[in-house]
Amino acid sequence: MFDIGFSELIVVALVALIVIGPERLPRVARTLGALLGRAQRYVNDVKSDIQREVNLDELKDLKSTFQDAAKSVEDSVNEVGKELQATGDSLNKSISGAGESTPEPTTEALPADGDSDTHAASPQLDLALESKSAADPATASKA
């Protein structure tokens, strides 16, 4: 800040002793020290306030970055969820459409002599029969 050496400080002290006088010099030195201390504290407070503001700006930037990343992840998860929901809906429609369009098998349609090659049931009908027999234990014991 100031380029003052030790010899220059001695000269300033001697001039102050001559101008101020030996009676008031201790009080002036004490006041001058207190003022310099206040000035140093003020400068340090300003520096710390500036540093806090810089850190706060960095934290705000970091917060916005994380919020953007979280929003991006949330959007992608929602998109995948919508795709899964659409796929599930289409599967449910195709399953319910297949169940409604095929007639229910009767005991007359099944071969009585066990010849499954001549009258082979479709796999969808087999699944329907298995699910009904699994759901109704009384029907399963008859079959």
Image (cartoon, rainbow, N blue to C red):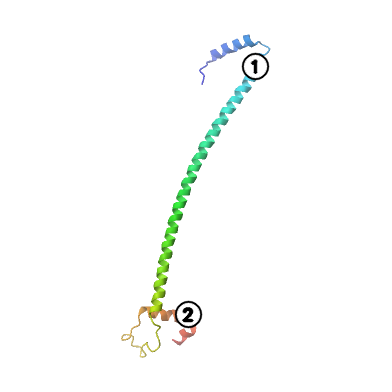
Most distant residue in the left direction: 118
Camera-side residue of 24 and 96: 96
Q: Is residue 124 left or right of residue 32?
A: left
Quarter-wise, where is residue 116 in the image?
bottom left
How many labels were placed on the picture? Answer: 2
Q: Which mark is residue 86?
A: none
In the image, what residue occupies the spot 42% across and 63% down? 84
Residue at screen point 45% across, 50% down: 69
Where's residue 139, x and y in %? 47, 85
Residue neighbourhood size for the residue with mark 2, other residues' Cα within 10 Å, grouped as few (<14), some (14–19), many (≥20):
few
Q: Position of residue 106 (x, y in %)?
A: 40, 87
Q: Quadrant of the C terminus?
A: bottom left
C-alpha gap between disc 1 and disc 2: 103 Å
How many residues crowd around disc 1 within 10 Å: few (fewer than 14), some, or many (20 or more)? few
Which callout, 1 or 2, points at the residue further toward the start of the chain?
1
Relative to 70, residue 40 above or below: above
Q: Amino acid at mark 2?
A: Ala
Compared with residue 5, is residue 82 higher up or lower down, i.e. above or below? below
- Above or below, comparing residue 89 to residue 6 in the picture: below
In this rendering, position of residue 26 left or right of residue 115: right
Residue located at (42% from left, 68% from top): 89
Label 1 belongs to which residue?
28
Percent position of residue 107, x then y: 40, 88
Element under disc 1: helix
Q: Which residue is mark 2?
A: 135
